[in-house]
Image (tube, helix red, strand yellow):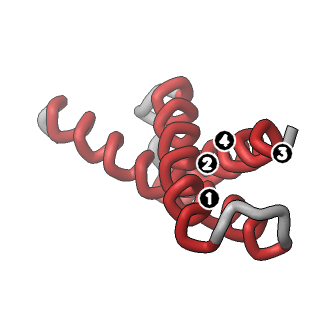
């Protein structure tokens, strides 16, 4: 059950991070599905990396690392994907 909660937190925070940077940078021309997928994937990846560094035991810092890693990972992955899409479109 703990693994499921960890993955849900990372996924949700990744999607939130992707949506946050998209709204901040005013990327309305990119589809929502792309931003949600990139944010979720980035949140899972960086959340797992931070979880390995901080530790995956059931503690406050582990959950804080999952949330922070998910948020940052979602924002970073979304920014990278949007940049790639814009370069391919010629903008």
SS at mark 4? helix
Q: Which mark is residue 2?
A: 3
SS at mark 3? helix
Q: Residue at x 87, y 37 (%)?
A: 1
Q: Position of residue 14 (x, y in %)?
A: 61, 48
Q: Nearer the viewer, mark 2 or mark 3?
A: 3
Q: How far apart, in angstroms, are the residues tagged by discs 2 and 4?
A: 5 Å
Q: How far apart, in angstroms, are the residues tagged by discs 1 and 4?
A: 9 Å
The residue identified by callout 2 is: 14
Instruction: Please state, as top left, top right, bottom left or bottom right, where the C terminus lies in the image.
Output: top left
Vertically, is 35 above or below 22? Answer: above
SS at mark 2? helix
Vertically, is 52 above or below 5? Answer: below
Mark before the other along the chain sequence, 2 or 1: 2
Q: Position of residue 13 (x, y in %)?
A: 69, 51
Q: Residue at x 66, y 41 (%)?
A: 11
Q: Which class describes the residues within 10 Å of circle 3: few (<14), some (14-19), or many (20+)?
A: few
Asked if the residues shown at circle 2 and circle 1 are in contact, with their CB atoms under 8 angstroms apart, the answer is: yes
Mark before the other along the chain sequence, 2 or 3: 3
Q: Position of residue 60 (x, y in %)?
A: 84, 73
The residue identified by callout 1 is: 71
Asked if the residues shown at circle 2 and circle 4 are in contact, with their CB atoms under 8 angstroms apart, the answer is: yes
The residue identified by callout 4 is: 11
- Closer-to-camera residue (90/6): 6
In-image side of 2 versus 19 (left or right): right
């Amino acid at each position: 059950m703990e693994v499921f909660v960890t993955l849900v937190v990372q996924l949700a925070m990744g999607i939130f991070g992707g949506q946050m940077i998209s709204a901040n940078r005013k990327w309305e021309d990119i589809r929502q599905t792309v931003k949600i997928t990139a944010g979720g994937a980035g949140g899972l990846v960086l959340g797992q990396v931070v979880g390995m560094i901080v530790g995956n035991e059931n503690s406050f810092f582990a959950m804080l690392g999952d949330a922070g890693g998910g948020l940052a990972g979602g924002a970073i992955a979304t920014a990278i994907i949007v940049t790639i899409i814009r370069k391919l479109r010629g903008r």
